[in-house]
Amino acid sequence: MSEPLLCAQHLTKRFGGLAAVNDVSVDLFRDRIHAVIGPNGAGKSTLTNLLSGDLPPTSGRITLNGVETAGHSPESISRLGLGRSYQKTNIFLPFTVWDNVRLAAQARERHSPWNPLRWLGRADRLSAVNQRCERALELAGLAPRGPVVAGTISHGEQRQLEIAMTLATEPTVLLLDEPLAGMGQAEAESMVALLQKLKKDHAILLVEHDMDAVFALADQLTVMVNGQVIASGTPTQVRADPAVQAAYLGEEH
Amino acid sequence: MSSPKATLELLPKSVQVLLGTGALTLAAFPFVPLEGTDFYLQMLSQMMILAIFAMSLDLLQGVTGMVSLGHAAYFGLAGYALAFLTPADTPISLWWALPVSALGAGLAALVIGFFVVRTHGIYFIMVTMAFAQMVFFLFFDNKELGGSDGLYVNFRPDATLFGWTGIDLENKTTFYYFTLAVLVLVYAFLRRLLFSPFGRVLSGIRVNEHRMRAVGYGTFGYKLAAFTLAGSLAGVAGFLWAAQTGYVNPELMGFHMSAHAIMMVILGGMGNFAGAIVGAFAFEYVMHFFKDLTKHWQLLMGGFIVLVVVLAPRGLLGLSERLLGKKEH
């Protein structure tokens, strides 16, 4: 198998005496979806936050595209090619859909807050940014919704917007925290189709509660309970694992 | 869901017409034959200077979402800079005193900003105020820096440019037009900045700084640049104030001055600079009106601000947009 784009080894995050994430290792490869499942409070979102730099790990190593990133700021990790979406919709509500994605796309331009020329140019005339923005909206299926204020679109569309903003930064690794949360049947199906399309060019970590989607999409599955990995493997292997059946799937399947 | 259009960035036609009319009125005012024109010219000059000051604060408060309760420090510092730069017996050249004073205020903002822009919300308000108080007492307690009495600016700056003496700032009308020109320039600059890549990032920081960092913006640099720029522009205003009044004292950088600027911006409407201008004029006008009425004017002033916040949460500009906008449809 090729080199992993993101490689996390023995990640641990302690809040006081509580180990929210305890000795977790994950490898993410291009063209592979690695799903993480587990009951509420299992540490899935904390794991995502460790990988994206929103939280520094207590111990462990993270390598993203060959660079050691544990403890780096979210912005520098983002610039190394990591894009993440949030469990709770985290967008710019007062801005239009287009401006949301445009702002994300602009993050890959040179950052020069001290250059007076950047104070006087027009943001909507940056053609490279506009192209990235257009492409991301097209991919996420939001192209016709550009001029609408993000606070007024449906919940499902806001979830799509989350993904579009992430894509506009042209990441190689995607961390998607419950992209299907609160979506209707039709919306969920189109999101699954989108993730299948994105898989080809990205390494994806998918945190999700929707088991149908997980088993439809995942190439690799990790089950977390109380901050620990209790099973990891292909979906078939995990399904057969007695510990998993007892702790988690047993209740639903 | 809370109102998605919390600030008004794009100005509707009705507001643009209002602003244009206001600018023309200001330009025509010196030609109006009025008793005590000199007095009104000075008063309007001061209002315009405060409008520049309020706009500089709006860059932080309305655009970036950083409410500074110490912005007067930079206003006052530039005023003091002019007082120190002006020799006792001759005026100083405007063309280097103004940049030096504004850059000095900007440098102070850069140094203070380096510490304060790391904080958020209520902590930001507190530390900006704390730093401004330090600056205030530095001048208040030091006889060498003028102490509590302040300093005189003996001459208005000399605007001679390559031997051309067309602008004589000692003339009240000329000074009035010079201030108007600076006001228009600063407004045009800030409007342009609002829609620049830099300005878009500042707006993004106001709405959701966390997400800005997640997509790759090092927000610290942007906030510090905005804080420094706002400090320099406050410096331009403070410089003009010192030149206009011929006098500086610690009150210029005091807590009240900072609080007034915040109220001006809220009164007019935040985040579009036009509101800051409207707010500054309205605030000053109402204040003078109440002062003539009673010595308890501060009570009335407080009531007025509360009323505006309740009736027009987006300020006078938002209110006028609502009223005028309805007629258009």
Image: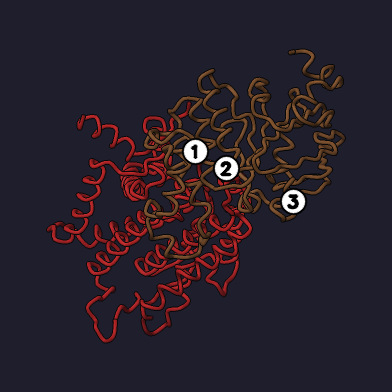
Q: Is residue B313 left or right of residue A24?
A: left
Q: Does dot 3 land on a helix, a strand or a loop?
A: strand
Q: CA distance from mark 1 to mark 3?
A: 30 Å
Q: CA distance from mark 2 to mark 3?
A: 22 Å
- Amino acid type, residue under disc 3 in the picture: Thr
Chain drawn brown in the picture: A
- Amino acid type, residue under disc 2 in the picture: Arg
Please name the residue that numbered disc 1 is placed on.
A92
Q: Is residue A110 left or right of residue B162?
A: right
Please name the residue that numbered disc 2 is placed on.
B211
Tell me, yes or no, whether dots 2 and 3 are on the same chain.
Answer: no
Of residue B265 and residue A101, the one placed in the foreground of this image is A101
Q: Residue at x 45, y 39 (%)?
A: A137
Chain drawn red in the picture: B
Please say whether residue B55 is visible from this viewpoint: no
Q: Does dot 2 land on a helix, a strand or a loop?
A: helix
Q: Residues within 10 Å of mark 2 (few under 14, many from 20)?
A: many
Q: Does dot 1 land on a helix, a strand or a loop?
A: loop
- Amino acid type, residue under disc 1 in the picture: Phe
Please name the residue that numbered disc 3 is placed on.
A63
Q: Residues within 10 Å of mark 1 (few under 14, many from 20)?
A: many
* Pointer 2 with pointer 3, Cβ within 8 A: no
In the displayed structure, A100 sits above or below B244; it is: above
The percent coordinates of residue B280 (x first, y second) are 36, 50
